[in-house]
Image (cartoon, coloured by chain):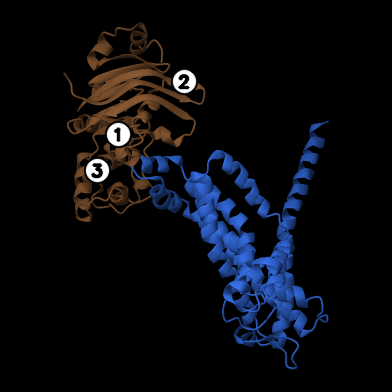
């Protein structure tokens, strides 16, 4: 093959790979544009102030109430609850895995935890309906276990693999010399973990929590199945709720094309998109600061 | 006769199947500097890490024999490893300040061992003065320790060890990551510290061993080949291996 031909192939392949790489960006941009475009159509019909301050999501009513607040509150409540459960559990599991677990146990636990991420969300939702929900109902002596708490427990299970895996990487990345320094000064393993290793791993731990939170916010099927489907403003963890994701999933199939209601679903999707985007950026930012610290 | 501070008796160490230390018997005299020398892989650092039980961290290390600090058997299960490490401090090859401020690096161990709060400030100041670091850092104790120069970091690590008033200080090639000027400062520091502490130092640098040691131990392939006064080992080695090593024929 002569040089000219080789250079041409080289150039062609380079452009091909570049194009493939750019597809992701085009996709992300396209989705964002679609959401914004349809949201603008929505806000042409409904006052944004009503959208962000009203108390009711009731597209079926005569005058149509389109307030994102009860849905946003539901999403926030269930995600915050899941983090309250998953963050301590995840970080301590990661700390146990990397600092205390004997080699054999580690070899078994790690793949099992990663397998947790492979369970389809619909199966987890099922678990919520037949097991966790009734359990919660019995525990608190209430009629209906399909509520925010149920969703939080299930989302915690789903966010755990992410949080554990990334936290463990962060803890492992803390130089061994730090631990040696602490131990050689006569600190025990616990003092070393809480006062040296975990603080040093903090940027990575924050990244882990952010990515876990992103997972919890975006999850649809589980919360749709297991949180009771009530789009009223929630008063607490024992109320039934309906998240942004569940609302879109339920209503999109039945809504007439290009009505206010149709556009409204795009608007709430855009809000969710912006929230998860912000959280992902934060997570990336902290993960990067960890990488700097490793160097 | 020198008073013996730290000693190893019939010490064998294995990593898995491989024997790293072979029947080591050695006595470290009090308030003297003893250098462990020998080619790479001879077991100097491994031996050093036996004295503060750092091998507890690796599950495949197996140790036989005994190590005594005065009359205390440090591998006796009754004795707490944290208490032993408080009495036998260690300085590592690469300066390893904790990712905290200078002050917190110094106060860390004091808090761990529950020294009275009102004494901490004073203890830190005197330990930093002992390491000739006080004048350089007294106005910026809140600064992250990693912002110090390599030599300053290593002196901080030494001060962080001495602030606990240990009895023995183990040093694992403390100058190998430092420039000549910092090295000289650390060597002067080591010599000045021996009035209060018993020092065991691993070094690759033969000149350094001659400059600072009272005793020298030459190790080869996991065995203690020769042990004696610094002058004797360097001027008049008894063993052929030692003669070749200190004469620069291998290593």
Residue indicated by mark 1: B182
Residue B140 vs residue A59, the one in the foreground: A59
In the displayed structure, A88 sits above or below A103; it is: below
Residue identified by numbered label 3: B163
**Label 1 to label 3: alpha-carbon separation:** 21 Å
Q: Colour of chain A?
A: blue
Q: Secondary structure at mark 3?
A: loop
- Left or right placement of residue B78 versus residue A203 in this view: left
Assign the N terminus of chain A to one quadrant of the image. top right
**Which residue shows up at 72% across the image and 80% down it?**
A264
**Do circles 1 and 3 both sit on a common chain?**
yes
Say which residue appears at 78% left-offset and 44% top-offset: A13
Which corner quadrant of the image does residue A240 belong to?
A: bottom right
Q: Residue at x 63, y 67 (%)?
A: A217
- Residue A280, percent from left and from top: 60, 62
**Chain under callout 1:** B
> Hue of chain B?
brown
Q: Is label 2 or label 3 in front?
A: 2
Q: Earlier in the sequence, mark 1 or mark 3?
A: 3
Q: Which residue, given by chain and number where applicable, does mark 2 sit on?
A: B19
**Under tag 2, what secondary structure?**
strand
Same subunit: marks 2 and 3: yes
Q: Nearer the viewer, residue A193 or A67?
A: A193
- Say if mark 1 contacts mark 3, CB within 8 Å: no
């Amino acid at each position: 093959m002569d040089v000219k031909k080789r250079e041409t192939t080289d150039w062609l392949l380079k452009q091909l790979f570049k194009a493939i790489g750019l597809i992701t960006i085009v996709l992300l941009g396209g989705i964002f544009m679609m959401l914004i475009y349809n949201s603008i159509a929505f806000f042409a019909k409904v006052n944004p102030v009503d959208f962000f301050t009203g108390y009711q999501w009731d597209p079926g009513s005569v005058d149509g109430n389109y307030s994102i607040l009860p849905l946003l509150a539901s999403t926030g409540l269930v995600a915050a609850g899941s983090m309250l459960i998953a963050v301590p559990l995840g970080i301590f599991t990661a700390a146990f895995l990397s600092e205390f677990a004997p080699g054999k146990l580690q070899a078994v636990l790690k793949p099992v935890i990663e397998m947790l991420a492979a369970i389809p969300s619909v199966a987890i939702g099922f678990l919520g309906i037949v097991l966790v929900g009734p359990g919660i109902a019995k525990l608190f002596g209430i009629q209906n276990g399909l509520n925010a708490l149920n969703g939080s427990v299930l989302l915690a299970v789903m966010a755990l693999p992410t949080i554990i895996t990334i936290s463990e990487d962060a803890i492992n990345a803390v130089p061994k010399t730090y631990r040696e320094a602490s131990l050689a000064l006569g600190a025990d393993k616990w003092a070393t973990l809480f006062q040296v290793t975990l603080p040093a791993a903090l940027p990575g731990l924050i990244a882990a929590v952010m990515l876990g939170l992103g997972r919890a916010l975006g999850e649809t099927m589980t919360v749709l199945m297991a949180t009771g489907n009530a789009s009223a403003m929630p008063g607490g963890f024992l109320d039934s709720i309906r998240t942004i994701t569940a609302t879109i999933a339920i209503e999109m199939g039945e809504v007439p094309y290009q009505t206010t209601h149709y556009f409204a679903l795009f608007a709430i999707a855009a809000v969710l998109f912006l929230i998860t985007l912000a959280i992902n950026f934060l997570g990336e930012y902290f993960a990067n600061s960890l990488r700097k610290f490793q160097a | 006769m020198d008073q013996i501070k730290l000693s190893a008796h019939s010490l064998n160490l294995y990593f898995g199947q491989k024997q790293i230390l072979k029947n080591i018997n050695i006595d470290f005299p009090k308030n003297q500097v003893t250098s462990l020398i020998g080619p790479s892989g001879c077991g100097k650092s491994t031996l050093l890490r036996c004295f503060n039980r750092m091998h507890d961290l690796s599950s495949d290390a197996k140790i036989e024999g005994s190590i005594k600090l005065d009359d205390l058997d440090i591998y006796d299960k009754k004795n707490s490893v944290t208490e032993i490490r408080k009495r036998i401090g260690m300085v590592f090859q690469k300066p390893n300040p904790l990712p905290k401020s200078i002050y917190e690096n110094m106060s860390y161990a004091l808090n761990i061992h529950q020294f009275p709060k009102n004494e901490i400030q004073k203890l830190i100041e005197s330990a930093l003065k002992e390491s000739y670091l006080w004048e350089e850092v007294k106005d910026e104790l809140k600064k992250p320790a990693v912002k110090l120069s390599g030599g300053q970091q290593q002196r901080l690590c030494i001060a962080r060890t001495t602030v606990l008033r240990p009895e023995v200080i183990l040093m694992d090639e403390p100058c190998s990551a430092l420039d000549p000027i910092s090295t000289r400062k650390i060597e002067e520091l080591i010599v000045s510290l021996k009035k209060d502490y018993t020092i065991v130092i691993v070094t690759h640098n033969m000149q350094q061993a001659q400059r600072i040691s009272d005793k020298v131990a030459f190790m080869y392939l996991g065995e203690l080949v020769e042990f004696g006064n610094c002058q004797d080992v360097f001027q008049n080695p008894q063993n052929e291996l030692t003669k070749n090593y200190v004469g620069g024929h291998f290593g």
